[in-house]
Amino acid sequence: MNTTSTSDLRRRRRNQTDVGNRETLFHTSSKKKLKKNKNKDKDDHEETKAKTSSYMRTKEMMKNGLQRVSDVSSALKDDERKLKNTRAEHERMGGGVKDAKYALTWLKVKEKEDVIVFW
Protein backbone atom coordinates (compact mmCIF):
# COMPACT_ATOMS: atom_id res chain seq x y z
CA MET A 1 0.00 0.00 0.00
CA ASN A 2 2.84 2.32 0.80
CA THR A 3 4.52 1.72 -2.58
CA THR A 4 1.32 2.49 -4.44
CA SER A 5 0.95 5.86 -2.77
CA THR A 6 4.61 6.66 -3.49
CA SER A 7 4.22 5.79 -7.16
CA ASP A 8 1.01 7.87 -7.31
CA LEU A 9 2.89 10.85 -5.86
CA ARG A 10 5.64 10.47 -8.43
CA ARG A 11 3.13 10.22 -11.26
CA ARG A 12 1.32 13.39 -10.09
CA ARG A 13 4.59 15.35 -9.81
CA ARG A 14 5.63 14.18 -13.27
CA ASN A 15 2.27 15.23 -14.73
CA GLN A 16 2.48 18.65 -13.06
CA THR A 17 5.98 19.12 -14.41
CA ASP A 18 4.87 18.08 -17.89
CA VAL A 19 1.93 20.50 -17.79
CA GLY A 20 4.18 23.33 -16.64
CA ASN A 21 6.68 22.56 -19.39
CA ARG A 22 3.91 22.55 -22.04
CA GLU A 23 2.55 25.88 -20.84
CA THR A 24 6.00 27.42 -20.87
CA LEU A 25 6.66 26.07 -24.34
CA PHE A 26 3.43 27.17 -25.99
CA HIS A 27 2.83 30.47 -24.17
CA THR A 28 6.21 32.07 -24.62
CA SER A 29 6.10 35.49 -26.21
CA SER A 30 7.83 36.03 -29.52
CA LYS A 31 9.99 38.80 -27.97
CA LYS A 32 11.48 36.34 -25.51
CA LYS A 33 12.17 33.90 -28.34
CA LEU A 34 13.85 36.63 -30.39
CA LYS A 35 15.95 37.69 -27.41
CA LYS A 36 16.92 34.07 -26.73
CA ASN A 37 17.93 33.64 -30.38
CA LYS A 38 20.14 36.75 -30.24
CA ASN A 39 21.78 35.54 -27.05
CA LYS A 40 22.16 32.10 -28.56
CA ASP A 41 23.82 33.57 -31.67
CA LYS A 42 26.14 35.61 -29.45
CA ASP A 43 26.95 32.53 -27.36
CA ASP A 44 27.52 30.48 -30.51
CA HIS A 45 29.86 33.15 -31.85
CA GLU A 46 31.81 33.26 -28.57
CA GLU A 47 32.00 29.48 -28.52
CA THR A 48 33.25 29.43 -32.11
CA LYS A 49 35.90 32.02 -31.27
CA ALA A 50 37.00 29.99 -28.25
CA LYS A 51 37.21 26.80 -30.31
CA THR A 52 39.16 28.55 -33.06
CA SER A 53 41.57 29.97 -30.51
CA SER A 54 42.00 26.54 -28.94
CA TYR A 55 42.63 24.95 -32.35
CA MET A 56 45.22 27.62 -33.16
CA ARG A 57 47.03 27.00 -29.85
CA THR A 58 46.93 23.25 -30.50
CA LYS A 59 48.25 23.78 -34.02
CA GLU A 60 51.12 25.93 -32.68
CA MET A 61 51.96 23.36 -30.00
CA MET A 62 52.01 20.57 -32.58
CA LYS A 63 54.16 22.69 -34.89
CA ASN A 64 56.65 23.30 -32.05
CA GLY A 65 56.63 19.61 -31.14
CA LEU A 66 57.27 18.64 -34.74
CA GLN A 67 60.17 21.11 -34.91
CA ARG A 68 61.68 19.62 -31.73
CA VAL A 69 61.36 16.10 -33.16
CA SER A 70 63.01 17.30 -36.37
CA ASP A 71 65.87 18.89 -34.39
CA VAL A 72 66.39 15.72 -32.35
CA SER A 73 66.34 13.63 -35.51
CA SER A 74 69.01 15.77 -37.18
CA ALA A 75 71.12 15.73 -33.99
CA LEU A 76 70.90 11.93 -33.93
CA LYS A 77 71.96 11.75 -37.58
CA ASP A 78 74.94 14.01 -36.84
CA ASP A 79 75.92 11.86 -33.87
CA GLU A 80 75.57 8.72 -35.96
CA ARG A 81 77.88 10.19 -38.62
CA LYS A 82 80.46 11.19 -35.99
CA LEU A 83 80.36 7.75 -34.39
CA LYS A 84 80.84 6.06 -37.76
CA ASN A 85 83.83 8.31 -38.50
CA THR A 86 85.30 7.59 -35.06
CA ARG A 87 84.81 3.86 -35.51
CA ALA A 88 86.45 3.92 -38.95
CA GLU A 89 89.38 5.88 -37.53
CA HIS A 90 89.66 3.47 -34.60
CA GLU A 91 89.64 0.48 -36.95
CA ARG A 92 92.43 2.05 -39.01
CA MET A 93 94.44 2.58 -35.86
CA GLY A 94 93.51 -0.83 -34.46
CA GLY A 95 96.17 -2.68 -36.50
CA GLY A 96 98.82 -0.12 -35.54
CA VAL A 97 97.93 -0.37 -31.86
CA LYS A 98 98.16 -4.16 -31.97
CA ASP A 99 101.52 -3.94 -33.71
CA ALA A 100 102.74 -1.42 -31.13
CA LYS A 101 101.61 -3.72 -28.32
CA TYR A 102 103.53 -6.66 -29.77
CA ALA A 103 106.57 -4.45 -30.35
CA LEU A 104 106.46 -3.22 -26.76
CA THR A 105 106.14 -6.78 -25.45
CA TRP A 106 109.10 -7.81 -27.64
CA LEU A 107 111.15 -4.89 -26.31
CA LYS A 108 110.37 -5.86 -22.71
CA VAL A 109 111.47 -9.42 -23.40
CA LYS A 110 114.71 -8.15 -25.00
CA GLU A 111 115.29 -5.84 -22.05
CA LYS A 112 115.00 -8.78 -19.63
CA GLU A 113 117.42 -10.77 -21.78
CA ASP A 114 119.88 -7.87 -21.75
CA VAL A 115 119.61 -7.57 -17.98
CA ILE A 116 120.40 -11.28 -17.63
CA VAL A 117 123.29 -11.10 -20.11
CA PHE A 118 124.86 -8.02 -18.49
CA TRP A 119 124.68 -9.44 -15.02
Image (cartoon, rainbow, N blue to C red):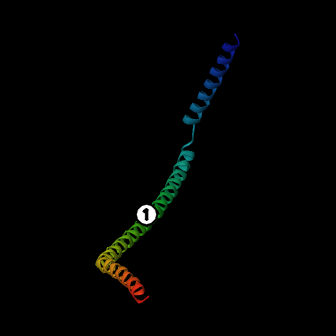
Residue drawn at x 50%, y 53% is 44
Image coordinates of residue 35 in percent, x first then y, are 56, 50
Q: Residue 16: name its quadrant.
A: top right
Q: Which residue lies furthest to the top in this view?
A: 1
Location of mark 1 (residue): 62
Q: Is mark 1 on a helix, strand or loop?
A: helix
Residue 31, above or below 79: above
User: Closer to the camera, 41 or 100?
Assistant: 100
Image coordinates of residue 108 in percent, x first then y, are 39, 82
Total residue callouts: 1
User: Closer to the camera, 79 or 55?
Assistant: 79
Image coordinates of residue 10 in percent, x first then y, are 65, 22
User: Closer to the camera, 104 or 71?
Assistant: 104
Residue drawn at x 39%, y 87% is 117
User: Taking 20 as reference, is 46 left or right?
Assistant: left
Q: What crowding class fits label 1: few (fewer than 14 Cα within 10 Å), some (14-19), or many (20 or more)?
A: few
User: Taking 20 as reference, is 99 left or right?
Assistant: left
Residue 6, above or below 110: above
Q: Residue 6: name its quadrant.
A: top right
Residue 29, above or below 58: above
> In which quadrant of the rendered image does the C terminus lie?
bottom left
User: Closer to the camera, 83 or 38?
Assistant: 83
